[in-house]
Image (cartoon, helix red, strand yellow):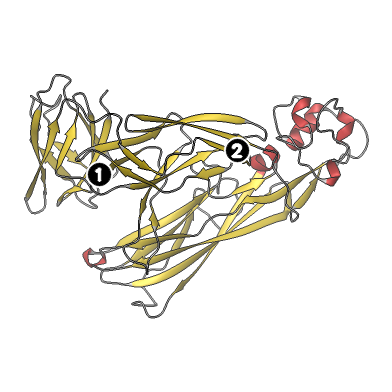
Amino acid sequence: MADTIRIYANRDGLVDVPNNIKVERGTKVLFSSTSVGSTVNITGFESTYWTSTLNAVLELGKDDTYHIKSNAPYGKSTLRVNDPVDGSKHPFTIEVVPSIDKPNPYYLSPSITSSYSGLNANEFVVSQIHTLQTEAYTIVHLRSDDPEVRFRLVELATSHHEEDFYGNWVTDFFMNSTYLKRFQIAFRAPTGSLESKTVTVRIGSRVHTVTLSTSTELVPSSHHVINFGRTSGELSLLDVKGFFGGAGNLRDYFRKGRNVPDMPANSGIPTSGSIRLTDFRGAATAFFIALHPRDRDTRLMLTQYGDQSTGVGWNIWTGEADDWDLGYSKFIKDNAEFRYTLDYKFHSGYGTTNPVQKPTLSSISGSPGTWSSANKSVHVTVYGRKREEFFVTCTVTMYARHKDFPTKTLSTSAQVKVRCVGV
């Protein structure tokens, strides 16, 4: 069965793919541009091979979709990337072949782990770095049946003085045997404790099944206690649900379960067997950072061509691969607010220590420094102007609090190191 592939192009030709690409009949081809400020044209689509012969006009951030005919002959279709600025043409070929080696890819190391257990609820698990080798001149599509599974490119350092660099997390990814060879996968654990789920990861024509299961979420010794506030009187199931979250079935609220942490205030709540509403008098939940964010490194290149920018972000409950997490229970996750601050330092001995434009901080709400439940991701952008070179460390401090208990505040931090290099 034919696959989908993506081919990137800029004014100088194809980007990170060979100039002769093998495909099967019926392949869907997405053409994308990496050029900023100008369109890129692709011409030469022949009706013998392609369902459309219109020229592709590529703009940054938009795909043009083409299809190889299901009855296309075996052979080469010659296309050209046209630079509309200087008129230069860069030919490449799409070769239709009877079949790509199956299974594809034929080398993947290490193998994909099939089971993760003992995870915290909602935790994202990041795989090892995988090395991919495919049949020559092919492009492989990485994707999953689970929309929460993410992939990212890993570029290994070119010298021992540098660290590895990581691309953005995406829901699907395209790799080939010539340039893009290393990647990671991120899986999200089930949303509650003591749950299990199975996802599939598709790499080319190979299908990998991965199981993720959660244990009882543990409460660390350092945490904020948030009291239920009901020590006497009548209680309703709605009261319990409103505090701990969950679906509202009383059996969802055993201690050590998905909603009720195991802590001294909850010693009267059973872990199994019979449970009563009166067991929740004097109960509490815990507020803590369950997963701290990781530091990042990246590079800003080609500054001799004009202004450039690069950046990285950290997410929490955005549908992306979460980089940090809070505990405990849906009560916390539905009612948390966030804000962020940025500090940066330009290092001496590496170009300028005072670039014209300084790093900036942004968030979904547009106000990263203001408490907001919408601030579920934060992004640092570093700018380089023409011929600038520098090395900067940006430190982002991430704050979280519960909107109903604003004095219960947590904080953690992460750094990104950016090298701006003119080549």
Residue most toward the bottom? 349
Tell me which corner region of the image, top left, top right, bottom left or bottom right, holds residue 135.
top left
Q: Amino acid at mark 1?
A: Ser
In this orientation, does residue 319 appear?
Answer: no
Q: Name the side, left or right, on which 95 lies relative to 249.
A: left
Residue 166 position within the rendered picture, expressed as x and y whole percent measured from the top left: 40, 53
Q: Is residue 84 above or below residue 307?
A: above
Q: Residues within 10 Å of mark 2 (few under 14, many from 20)?
A: some
Q: Amino acid at mark 2?
A: Ser
* SS under mark 1: loop
Q: Quadrant of the C terminus?
A: bottom left
> Residue 311, labelled with which disc?
none
Per the image, the residue denoted by label 1 is: 177
Per the image, the residue denoted by label 2 is: 117
Q: Is residue 386 above or below residue 288?
A: below
Residue under the point 69% across and 51% down: 288
Residue under the point 55% across and 46% down: 316
